[in-house]
Amino acid sequence: MFTLYTAATPNGRKASIMLEECGLDYDVHPLALGKREQKQDWYLQINPNGRIPVIVDHGNDDFAVFESGAILIYLAEKTGQFLPPTTSENSKDRSLVIQWLMFQMGGLGPMMGQANVFFRYAEENIPYAVDRYQKETRRLLEVLDTRLADNEYLAGAYSIADIANFAWARTASWSGVESRDLEHLSRWIQAIRVRPAVRRGLDVPPKDQLGKTDDEFVKSAQKMVT
């Protein structure tokens, strides 16, 4: 049994999708980010970085795991799913999954996050910053598109690399970046989106901050860049 501390963000979706894909039982504890609940003392005892998501594994002495990429790896290794095991025979396959996971953790996520800040939330409009992060987001999406031109998924079979990158790439329009012209990326996003576990994970928590379902949220964002 797990507890998931989360909010309606791409990183939060990564954890909920993975829990659903692995068929694990979990309780959801949504955090009100706007009220800075993630910075309260009780939560900082669980995650010193004061961010979401976090999982607590009650079957392993209430062991807490923070950082979304670390959560994906932890659950994959615990269940033996969506990440090749550590063996000499599988070293290349495992490395490939982790490489594409790190691509999201170190590239796509941070760049899209900055694009979101300057495009949507900054009190001052700074065109240079908006342009910089939107262009870099687009470039990274094009890297994914190129990879997916000759590969059904990013690293062989469907894996935590796909879960991580999907959670961010699907929201490109929220960053003000058009991506629907990227044929291979669009095919991949749709193939993942229709997975039953993914659809369940995308609605954890059930409503986003705008009070819309997840699909409605993405559609409204897409209209803003057309």
Image: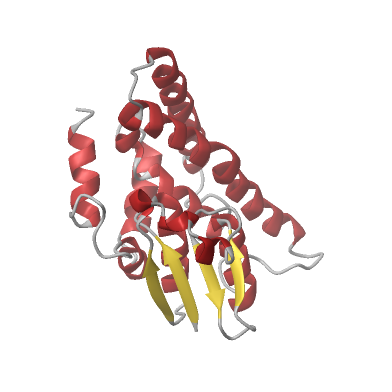
Where does residue 56 sit, x and y in percent of width and height? 55, 74
According to the image, what is the colour scheme of the structure?
Answer: secondary structure
Q: How many marks?
A: 0
Where does residue 138 sit, x and y in percent of width and height? 43, 28
Q: Residue at x 59, y 65 (%)?
A: 45
Where does residue 62 sit, x and y in percent of width and height? 60, 80
For the C terminus, the image quarter is: top left
Say whether residue 144 is visible.
Answer: yes
Image quadrant assignment for residue 222: top left
Image quadrant assignment for residue 91: bottom right
Residue 149, compared with residue 213, is above or below; it is above
Say whether residue 178 is visible.
Answer: no
189 or 170: which is nearer to us?
Answer: 170
199 or 157: which is nearer to us?
Answer: 199
Where does residue 154 sit, x and y in percent of width and height? 53, 49
Q: Residue at x 39, y 26 (%)?
A: 118
Q: Residue at x 58, y 53 (%)?
A: 49
